[in-house]
Image: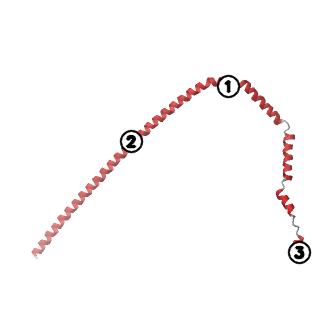
Amino acid sequence: MQQLYRYMKLPEIGEVWARLFDHRPFLNGEIKFMLKEFEEKRGDREVENLFYILEKVTDIKDSQVDKIKKGSEAALPVLSEKLNQALEVCEAVETDYLKVQKTCEQKRTENREKRQKEWDQFIDDMNFKCQRIDNAFEEKEEELRDLYADLNHKLNITK
């Protein structure tokens, strides 16, 4: 076993640490790439773009702001009036909806009460009919009991 360890080359701890935690070679390559990208390839395009944007913003500030102010002074009252009209229409729709909802709720309540009354009446009718059937059954039972008692009495007398 010791011979096997002798032939294996194990890296030193410093090499392992350098490979795992030292990122300088990678970062140096990335930094060089970024510098090359921005300095060589793009040149002064970004600076030229910034000056172009600054020129446009200055032009807009000098000439367009007054034009926009005048346009907004003319258009904002009309827009405000239209928004107020739209708000009034929305409030009217909401009022109508609430009225309809209230009417529907009243109708539902009335229908519920009507169905409850009909149900109570139905239950009362069924109870009355059941009572009548029970009474008729008891009367028939009594009649049959009397009839058989009479027949039994007649049979006992004739014997």
Please identify the residue farthest to the left as the structure is shown.
158
**Label ID, residue 124:** none
Color style of the picture: secondary structure
Q: Quadrant of the N terminus?
A: bottom right
Q: Along the polypeptide, which appears first: circle 2 or circle 1?
A: 1
- Going by the numbered disc 3, the residue's amino acid type is Gln
- Going by the numbered disc 2, the residue's amino acid type is Lys
| Residue 72, above or below 11 | above
- Going by the numbered disc 1, the residue's amino acid type is Ile
Contact? badges 1 and 3 (CB < 8 Å): no
Estimate how packed mark 2 is, as few (under 14), some (14 to 19) or many (20 or more) residues with alpha carbons within 10 Å.
Answer: few
Quadrant housing residue 159: bottom left
The residues bearing labels 1 and 3 have C-alpha atoms spaced at a distance of 89 Å
**Label ID, residue 107:** 2
Residue drawn at x 10%, y 74% as measured from the top left: 157
Residue at disc 1, secondary structure: helix
The residues bearing labels 2 and 1 have C-alpha atoms spaced at a distance of 56 Å
Residue drawn at x 66%, y 24% as measured from the top left: 69
Q: Along the polypeptide, which appears first: circle 1 or circle 3?
A: 3
Quadrant housing residue 59: top right
Residue at disc 2, secondary structure: helix
Q: What residue would you read off at disc 1? A: 68
Which residue is at the front of the view, 91 or 150?
91
Instruction: Describe residue 80's horizontal placement relative to residue 120 as left or right.
Output: right
The residues bearing labels 3 and 2 have C-alpha atoms spaced at a distance of 100 Å
Residue drawn at x 61%, y 25% as measured from the top left: 75
Instruction: Describe residue 117's horizontal placement relative to residue 84 as left or right.
Output: left
Q: What residue would you read off at disc 3? A: 3
